[in-house]
Amino acid sequence: MEDENPEASSNKVPSLSQVVEELKELWGMTLPITTMNFLVFLRQVVSVLFLGRIGSLELAGGALSIGFTNITGYSVMVGLAAGLEPICSQAYGSKNWDLLCLSLQRMVLILLTATIPIGLLWLNLDTIMVFLGQDQEITRMAAIYCIYSLPDLLTNTLLQPLKIFLRSQKDTKPMMYCTLVAVGLHVPLNYVMVAVLGMGIRGVAMASVLTNLNIVGLMSGYVWVWGRKGEMRWTVKIGEVCGGVGPMMKLAVPSCLGICLEWWWYEIVTVLSGYLSNPTSAVAATGILIQTTSMMYTVPLALSGCVSTRVGNELGGGKPKKAKLAAMVALGCAFLIGGMNVTWTVILRRTWATLFTDDALVKSLVSSALPIIGLCELWNCPQTTGYGILRGTARPAVGARINLGSFYLVGTPVAVGLAFGLKVGFVGLWFGLLSAQVACAVSMLYVVVAKTDWEAEALKAKKLTGLEMAATHGAEEEEESKKLLVDENGHQHYIF
């Protein structure tokens, strides 16, 4: 292993050529993923535009349904699938093809199980929303959209794991091309469903489902034809798949919590804005700002996923120095991206809202909060990247604890205190987000930069990927391989 060579210690300062090489490697993966994320963002924009053309009631109902399904469904599935990142990336780095294949199947099984409670929630959206005091007509439209979106749960049981499975093997360009083709068909699908067949809000929901189905079909085809089919055992015993579900859940659940805790906070801000004076304008301005942050988030989200892969690959290959280099280079890029976001939000603060609305009050609210959003992104980029590094080192629970403390013990009290207690109003909510992002970023950087022992992480990765190889060769070896790994906090975890 690399750390057996003193010259390869992770504490050695890297050369300029090594930094440049890592930048090429990292952005060679990140740019296609950023493009893919932006295409997915455009798909949602197209759906909202078609909803708006149908009518204001359909637009309101669709927006309510999209928010509900994001909170109760998609955030959970994306979060659970993120637990696959450390295993797949480290398995690829150690050339453990059996573990790659088994992990994909285990995550599909986990997500299939998760669709049952999520599906029940979606079927009862109308009852839940009416109980919470939502308008009945809007709720009726939201329920229709939600019911016709149900097949998307099954689509995502394969879509989310496939994205991580391919990214862990650095196959990011095929993912981009598959998404480009599918999203390119999204507008014609909506047109046929809405304008030609006259299906209204049902057609918009079905078009989104079919677009995701097209992405899954194209990605699955790529894996089957050009993927590492010959090096993986796609036919395995059911016991091998089910036997590793429990240990995988120890990574999936913290990953899910870490992602959902941040995702849900933005929905809480939307709800809180409805209690301000001029709630209609405040909610509209919040919607514009959240769409803006979603657009800016496409780059750090891609960077986070790719640095998770880079760190996991290098640790799995026994190269702690390269893993640390990948982490530090990614964090440097994150601060640079954050600085760019601050710059453009300050420059365009008075004109940005005109792209979305002509309402003078809404434009004024957006203008006042946009520079704060830019400052949030200055810290959001490194904290998102830091969380990706923690996932790559199989420590998602640390990130989940940081997100819980930052967003709910720091951000929420500051937001509520400023907006309502001190009567600061709308911008007070976004100062709450800024405080949460600063606390989160500082905590992430402390853990990643100051507290991570990269040689120890490489040894843990070697055990994680090596034990699975033994565990798939017989009952005796499986029992023998059930050893304990101890994390940096002294907690013990059974690994396969």
Image: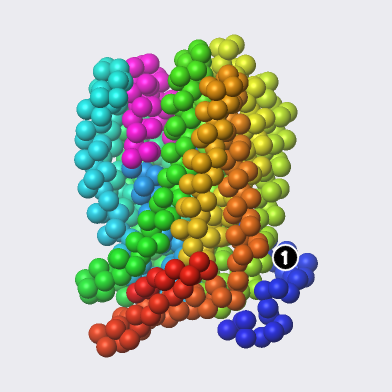
Q: Which residues are magenta?
A: 44-72
Q: Indicate the secondary structure of the residue bearing disc 1.
A: helix
Instruction: Tell which of 35 and 190 is nearer to you.
Output: 35
Residue 490 visible in image: yes
Query: Is 420 on the left-hand or right-hand side of 470?
Result: right
Instruction: Give the residue displayed 25% in from the left and 85% down from the top.
Output: 475
Residue named by callout 1: 19
Q: Residue at x 47, y 59 (%)?
A: 396
Residue 60 occupies which quadrant of the picture?
top left
Q: Relative to 138, is 31 on the left or the right? A: right
Dominant secondary structure of the magenta stretch?
helix
Q: Position of residue 244 (x, y in %)?
A: 30, 70
Q: Quadrant of the N terminus?
A: bottom right
Q: Nearer the viewer, residue 21 or 344?
A: 344
Q: Is residue 144 visible?
A: no
The question of residue 68 being in magenta is answered with: yes
- In what quadrant of the picture does the C terminus appear? bottom left
Residue drawn at x 55%, y 28% is: 417
Quadrant in the picture for residue 359? top right
| Residue displayed at 37% across by 38% down | 71
Residue type, label 1? Val
Q: Nearer the viewer, residue 423 or 229?
A: 423
Does residue 400 sit above or below 210 in this rendering?
Answer: below
On the image, the x and y values in percent for residue 207 come to: 33, 35
Q: Residues within 10 Å of mark 1 (few under 14, many from 20)?
A: some
Q: Position of residue 346 (x, y in %)?
A: 71, 29
The quarter of the picture where residue 101 lies is bottom left
**Up/down of 246 relative to 199, above or below:** below
